[in-house]
Image (cartoon, rainbow, N blue to C red):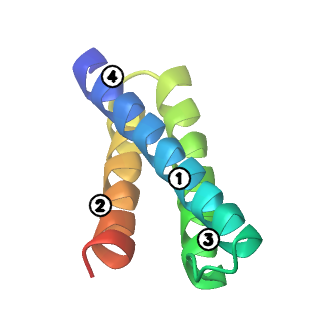
Amino acid sequence: MTLVRAVSGVVAGGVLALLCVVVGAAVIGSRRDFPGPGAESLSWHVVAAVVVVVAQVFADRRRGMSTVFGSVAVLVTAGVLLWTQWWG
């Protein structure tokens, strides 16, 4: 269970890093009149970041199968974010 929680923690950190990249690109784009990521992409990243943080905190504070469910929520959310916003 600890390995699953550790992997989902790293993935959650990655989602937060992606959020920072997208927000940074939006700020730089707006300051330089360059088309950066739109409001839809920003919204997806913010929602995904909130979901993964809540799910990871849930997984970290529980024991047993609850840990797995929280970790799976992190992994699925990150997968959906990557699939729809980065690879789609």
Identify the amino acid type marked 3.
Leu
The label number, if any, that marks residue 6 in the structure image: 4
Considering depth in this image, is 57 or 22 the residue closer to the camera? Answer: 22
Q: Which residue is mark 3?
A: 42
Which one is in front in this view, the residue at disc 3 or the one at disc 1?
Answer: 1
| Mark 2 Cα-neighbour bin, 10 Å: few <14, some 14–19, many ≥20 | some
Q: Are marks 1 and 4 in contact (CB under 8 Å)?
A: no
Q: Which residue is mark 1?
A: 21
Q: Secondary structure at mark 2?
A: helix
Question: Left of 22 or right of it: where is 43?
Answer: right
Considering depth in this image, is 44 or 38 the residue closer to the camera? Answer: 38
Q: Residue at x 33, y 22 (%)?
A: 6
Q: Residue at x 60, y 43 (%)?
A: 54
When asked about the image quadrant of residue 58, the answer is top right
Identify the amino acid type marked 2.
Gly
Considering only order in the chain, which callout, 4 or 2, is on the residue closer to the N terminus? 4
Q: Residue at x 41, y 30 (%)?
A: 9
